[in-house]
Amino acid sequence: MLSTVNSFDFIDATDKYLWGYMYGLSREYIIDYLESKNVPISGAKIIEIGCAEGGNLCAMAERGAAELVGTDINEPRLVHAKQIAEKLGLDITYSTHDVIYDEPLPEWIGHFDIAMLRDVIEHLDDAEIALRNIRRILKPGGVLYVTFPPYYSAFGGHQQTLVNWSSKVPFMHLLPKPIFEKMIASGRPADQVEVRRLRDIRMTTNKLRKAAAAAGYSIADEKLYLIRPVYKMKFGMNPIGANFLKPLPGLRDIVALEAGYILKNRE
């Protein structure tokens, strides 16, 4: 499937790269991880919030998911996702939808076995509202898979998106605001706006745990990483776990580059 997508001429090299690493991550890690925790993909009804070009969902279609829905607030990325799925002959539905501010579609209520928020929750202004809205569309006992880089970790500020000299500086987002502003000034304007938002939100493992409990979930599994699984796709680096940090709330948000959770709908 990857070679087929790379042959498409209606998307550029950047979109192929973004689709490809998400497809690879899902095939090589996410699917196996979920199934190892008794969350089967085959036959499941799955929705991904913040699906971008749809690489995750295409991999799950290969694994035999019964129904696949992807949502995003970025319409151009959804256009590409739809085009890719159509060319691959995959039955995936894509919809422009804001998980905080838009009502779920009536047919989504209580419908899905699995929801996914991969590297999305740290961008949301109100995590608890988002988690409550997602819980409404899960079946009783359904699960939500969440990952994010804790804000206080080396690249938790998403400075790598700036594509300037400061994008490779770890922990630069924790510097005093005047220095931070100077360091992001040469980045792309839209990315400057987003890294400022992330500085206001500052998602942490404690914030996620509290929001999940308040929204009606139990934590079925938590997994921390020193080297993120996605780095295998991006840089050829093998994942390194960091579950030894779980009982160390201050340290885990600084040292772990990824926090991942399987949250179970308590209903």
Image: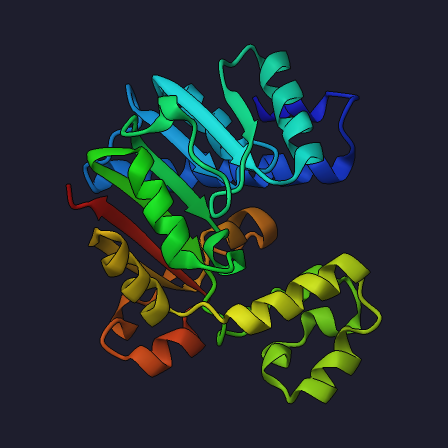
Q: Which colour scheme is used?
A: rainbow
Say which residue appears at 79% left-offset and 72% top-offset.
165
Asked if residue 89 is positioned above or below residue 62 in the image, the reply reads above
74 to the left or right of 149: right
35 to the left or right of 129: left
Quadrant (top left, top right, bottom left, bottom right) of the N terminus: top right
Say which residue appears at 40% left-offset and 74% top-offset.
253
Quadrant (top left, top right, bottom left, bottom right) of the C terminus: top left
Q: Front-most of 54 and 17?
A: 54
Taking the image as drawn, is residue 59 in sight?
yes
Asked if residue 263 is positioned above or below residue 172 in the image, the reply reads above
158 to the left or right of 207: right
Q: Front-most of 170 and 28?
A: 170
Tell me where residue 35 appears, x and y as whole percent: 25, 35
Q: Residue 54: name its quadrant.
A: top right
Q: Front-most of 70 and 42?
A: 70
Specify the farthest residue to the top. 89
Specify the farthest residue to the right. 186
Taking the image as drawn, is residue 4 in sight?
no
